[in-house]
Image (cartoon, rainbow, N blue to C red):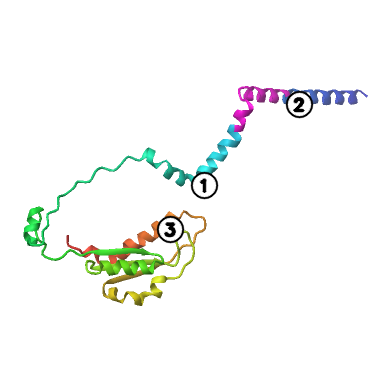
Amino acid sequence: MEGAITARRRRMVSAKTSAVRAGLCISKLRCIFRGFDLKSLFLLFVVVPIFIFGMYLHGQKITYFLRPLWESPPKPFNVIPHYYHENVSMQNLCKLHGWGIRDTPRRVFDAVLFSNEVDMLAIRWNELRPYVSEFVLLESNSTFTGKKKPLFFARNREKFHFAESRLTYGTVGGRFLKGENPFVEESYQRVALDQLIKIAGIGKMIC
């Protein structure tokens, strides 16, 4: 009998102890949130996470939108006066500018990161043909956004036979990574284009 009463007392004491602890926890929470109202809690747990998630998704667009606020205008150009007349010799024209005549013509490279603009490329190269020493073209089987595409230049290469003797052509495989920033793929292809320009012989230029 006495053992049962003792067990009951212990259970009652344990229940009271648990109730006191729960009360203390609630009172602590009340103390913590006493300085917060409903608007502050809504701002902290709803608005702030949405803002952070939006910055993660559209951070680049937002920075471009605010670009006029943080970017300073470029320095003005140093305008060099140009003297030219068709009846004046090249040697005298160079002297007017403080230059000398080169022993060999300067080599000019035209490098293109090609997608699918066949007609525009034909116009460009026909216009530049008298002035360009080497045409450099790189294309990929992937767009910047990671979509697969055919090699349009390879299909239409016969249209550019006039530039074949001065053409350095290369291809680079796409990585097809879904969800990646298109600028990363563009940078990857531009690095490959830089290597192709070196293969074309730009490092052998004498300036």
Pick whichever, 154 or 188, lies toward us: 154
x, y percentage for residue 65? 43, 43
Please tell me which of labels 1 and 3 falls first in the chain. Answer: 1
In this rendering, the answer to whether 155 lies above or below 113 is below
Question: Residue 204 versus residue 21: which sits nearer the camera?
Answer: 204
The residue most toward the right is: 1
Please provide percent x and percent y for residue 74.
29, 43
Residue 16 visible from this viewpoint:
yes
Q: Is residue 27 above or below residue 179?
A: above
Q: State which region is magenta.
A: 23-42
Magenta stretch holds residue 10: no
Q: CA distance from mark 2 to mark 1?
A: 47 Å
3D distance between C-alphas at marks 1 and 3: 18 Å
Name the residue carrying label 1.
57
Name the residue: 12% across, 54% down: 83
Residue 185 circle label: 3
Q: Is residue 205 left or right of residue 167?
A: left
* Residue under pointer 2: 18
Relative depth, front residue between 86 and 144: 86
